[in-house]
Image (cartoon, rainbow, N blue to C red):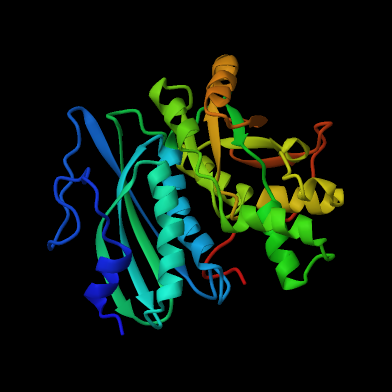
């Protein structure tokens, strides 16, 4: 039977030159930011039965656990550096640990992000990652920086992850096996938009940004509240995922606007930067879509393609009020 320290050594310690000043093996890790850089730090927790189904594929879960944290760095425009992992396990299952660590490290290697410490214990399956990134001082894409007249942009597509979740629950018409697989990949293996976030912050091209984890309407509301502005959102301009795009309009509107688990970027940028934003998106190999504008008047106004007001009752996900 694996002990706690055997588990860490076998599945989470890697034989490679560390980027951290001091990594796994001491009471604390040490990071030394480059001169003129700031550290960006974020934590996310995933709990079995709340954030993922019991029996979820371990490799996909390893990917998603790190991806949601990388997405937070992308939203600030930060370059990934390192992360810590706190892991509660019902049992030390070698097959699960091998799959989980493989999925996590595959993504970590793709973004040059090093595991530098953490903790393990026995308990209900819970995964908590704290991630560290760096960016030029004063270049962070903050939620409180949107300005009237800014365009609102969305990266990638929305809604397929929510469609997959509702299909698994039997809450929507059944999808065929291929469609469910495609939509399920958006739910289980989101793609962090780090390159786009870096480009938007480095120039800088954008004013404010966040990642869409709890649904666009709810998450955009955080920008509006922090920036003390309002917005007009063209719901029919929202880029539906390829599987959701084949569904009825009412479902497309609802899942694009308030689906959650998309981990795309929502950002605001001056209208004068439209060409530069599109060029940065092409360089980052990430499509972007302009979907609305920031207004001086408070509140979020939802409209259709013709500009007519939509009476849609939508809200973002909340861990204590949502089912």
Furthest-bottom residue in this view: 1
Residue 281 location, quadrant? top right
Q: In the rendered picture of this protein, how many numbered marks are placed on residues?
A: 0
Could you tell me which residue is drawn at 40 percent across and 67 percent down? 127
Instruction: Look at the picture and state if 1 lies above or below 312.
Output: below
Q: Nearer the viewer, residue 281 or 305?
A: 281
Q: Position of residue 64 (x, y in %)?
A: 50, 57
Could you tell me which residue is drawn at 64 percent across and 42 percent down? 300
Instruction: Look at the picture and state if 75 lies above or below 47.
Output: above
254 on left or right of 146: right
77 on left or right of 310: left
210 on left or right of 121: right
Q: Position of residue 195 (x, y in %)?
A: 46, 32
Q: Position of residue 235 (x, y in %)?
A: 74, 41
Q: Is residue 315 visible?
A: no
242 on left or right of 5: right
Q: Nearer the viewer, residue 185 or 35?
A: 185
Q: Indicate the quadrant containing the N terminus: top left, top right, bottom left or bottom right.
A: bottom left
Could you tell me which residue is drawn at 67 percent across and 35 percent down? 232
Q: Nearer the viewer, residue 38 or 311?
A: 38
Q: Is residue 87 visible?
A: yes
Could you tell me which residue is drawn at 59 percent across and 60 percent down? 317
Q: Position of residue 196 (x, y in %)?
A: 50, 31
Q: Indicate the quadrant containing the C terminus: top left, top right, bottom left or bottom right.
A: bottom right
Q: Nearer the viewer, residue 41 or 271?
A: 41
Residue 73 location, quadrant? top left
């Amino acid at each position: 039977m694996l002990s706690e320290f055997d588990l860490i050594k076998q599945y989470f310690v890697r034989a490679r030159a560390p980027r951290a000043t001091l990594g796994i093996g001491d009471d604390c890790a040490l990071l030394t930011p480059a001169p003129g850089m700031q550290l960006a730090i974020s934590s996310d927790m995933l709990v079995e039965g709340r954030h993922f189904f019991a029996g979820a594929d371990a490799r996909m879960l390893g990917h998603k656990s790190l991806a949601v944290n990388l997405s937070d760095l992308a939203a600030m425009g930060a370059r990934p550096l390192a992360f810590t992992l706190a892991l509660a396990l019902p049992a030390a299952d070698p097959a699960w640990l091998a799959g989980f660590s493989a999925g996590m490290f595959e993504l970590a290697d793709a973004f040059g992000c090093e595991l530098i410490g953490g903790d393990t214990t026995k308990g209900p399956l819970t995964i908590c990652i704290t991630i560290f990134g760096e960016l030029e001082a004063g270049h962070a894409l903050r939620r409180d920086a949107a300005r009237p007249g800014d365009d609102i942009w969305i990266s990638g597509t929305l809604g397929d992850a929510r469609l997959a979740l509702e299909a698994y629950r039997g809450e929507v018409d059944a999808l065929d096996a291929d469609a469910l697989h495609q939509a399920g990949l958006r739910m289980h293996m989101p793609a962090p938009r780090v390159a786009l976030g870096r480009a938007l912050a480095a120039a800088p091209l954008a004013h404010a940004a966040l990642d869409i984890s709890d649904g666009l309407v709810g998450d955009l509301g955080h920008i509006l509240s922090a920036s003390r502005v309002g917005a007009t959102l063209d719901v029919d301009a929202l880029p539906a995922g390829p599987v959701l795009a084949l569904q009825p309009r009412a479902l497309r509107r609802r899942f694009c606007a308030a689906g959650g688990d998309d981990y795309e970027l929502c950002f605001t940028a001056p209208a004068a930067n439209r060409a530069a934003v599109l060029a940065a998106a092409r360089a980052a190999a990430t499509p972007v879509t302009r979907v609305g504008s920031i207004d001086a008047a408070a509140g979020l106004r939802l409209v259709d393609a013709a500009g007519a007001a939509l009476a849609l009752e939508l809200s973002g996900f909340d861990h204590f009020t949502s089912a």
